[in-house]
Amino acid sequence: MVTIYGCLRSRATRPIWLMYEAGAEFRHVPVIQSYRLPDPAAADAPFHTASPGFLAVNPQGQIPAMQDGDLVLTESLGITLYLARKLGGDLGPRDAAEDALAVQWALVGATAVETPAIDILSTHSKGLAGTEDGARTIAAAQAALVRPFTRLEAHLQGRDWMMGDRFTVADIVLAECVRYTTAQADTLDPYPALKAWLARCQARPAFQHMWAQRTAEPM
Ligand SMILES: N[C@@H](CCC(=O)N[C@@H](CS)C(=O)NCC(=O)O)C(=O)O
């Protein structure tokens, strides 16, 4: 059985959302980031990213990680794409062209969206959005998002989903990068099709199920 390591307050949301969409069984080990613990060395500390047992799975000490038989993967987007291909069905790519498109949208997420999106999210989560520095960081991140978001906005004209005519892994890998930008409420306002697409993705029962579990996890 596939094992996914990583609490849901992490990029483990990506493969776990996919597994819920597929209705696939998996073992979930909710490893927590060591930096979130007051004393990671304490005897009663939960299993975390610097625990020897987890470093034996991912020596990089980051979540998510996935084990499927002898295969260990340690990049959230690689894990999510692998699981979509393995599970097959409508969520995964149907042919080489769709496979390339799914990889393309994952790379747009990882290379063009994720870094500025996390800048926005972390500025808010550190309570700095109201400061001069924080406002500058958010404005710079929103400026960096203009090119990828304009491209996504154009792509979504007249279509509901990123790839083909159905919800797929391409939507999951991209939506979980775009989500971080919504920490700043006005970020998606200039991109109504992108905003509507994200709302469609997040209205799905599998996302809602994952999100309820994530919300129930300690901060
Ligand atoms: N590019 C990696 C990033 C992994 C990553 O940064 N994970 C964070 C949680 S979302 C983590 O494990 N942080 C703990 C640490 O770096 O010590 C991926 O997408 O899987």
Image (spheres, helix red, strand yellow):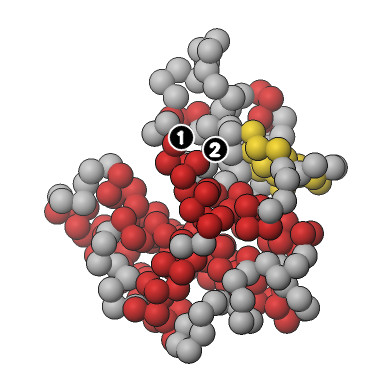
Depth check, mark 1 against mark 2: the one in front is 1
Asked where in the image residue 93 lies, by quadrant, the reply is bottom right
Q: Is residue 172 shown to the viewer in this render?
A: yes
User: Could you say which quadrant of the image residue 142 lies in?
Assistant: bottom left
Type of the residue with mark 1: Glu
Using the image, determine if residue 192 lies above or below residue 21: below
- Residue at 56% from the left image edge and 68% from the top image edge: 171
Q: How many marks?
A: 2
Pinpoint residue 216: horizontal percent, then vertical percent. Answer: 44, 36
Residue plotted at (21% across, 51% down): 129
- Residue 115, position as x, y percentages in the image: 43, 59
Q: Nearer the viewer, residue 39 or 20?
A: 20
Residue 13 in the image: x percent, y percent? Answer: 54, 49
Discs 1, 2 touching: Cβ within 8 Å: yes
In the image, what residue type sits under mark 2?
A: Cys
Q: Which residue is mark 2?
A: 7
Task: Tell me: is circle 2 under 8 Å from ligand 1.
Answer: no
Reading the image, the residue beneath label 1 is: 217
Left/right of residue 141 with respect to residue 164 in the rendered view: left
- Which labelled disc corresponds to residue 87? none
Image quarter where the C terminus lies is: top left
Who's the residue at 46% across and 45% down the image?
212
Q: Quadrant of the N terminus?
A: top right
Q: Along the horizontal axis of the image, is 198 left or right of 119? A: right
Pointer 2: residues within 10 angstroms few (<14), some, or many (20+)?
A: many
Percent of width and height locating residue 133 = 19, 52
Q: Could you tell me how far apart the alpha carbons at marks 1 and 2 are, in whole angstroms? A: 8 Å
Q: Secondary structure at mark 2?
A: loop
87 and 127: which is toward the camera: 87
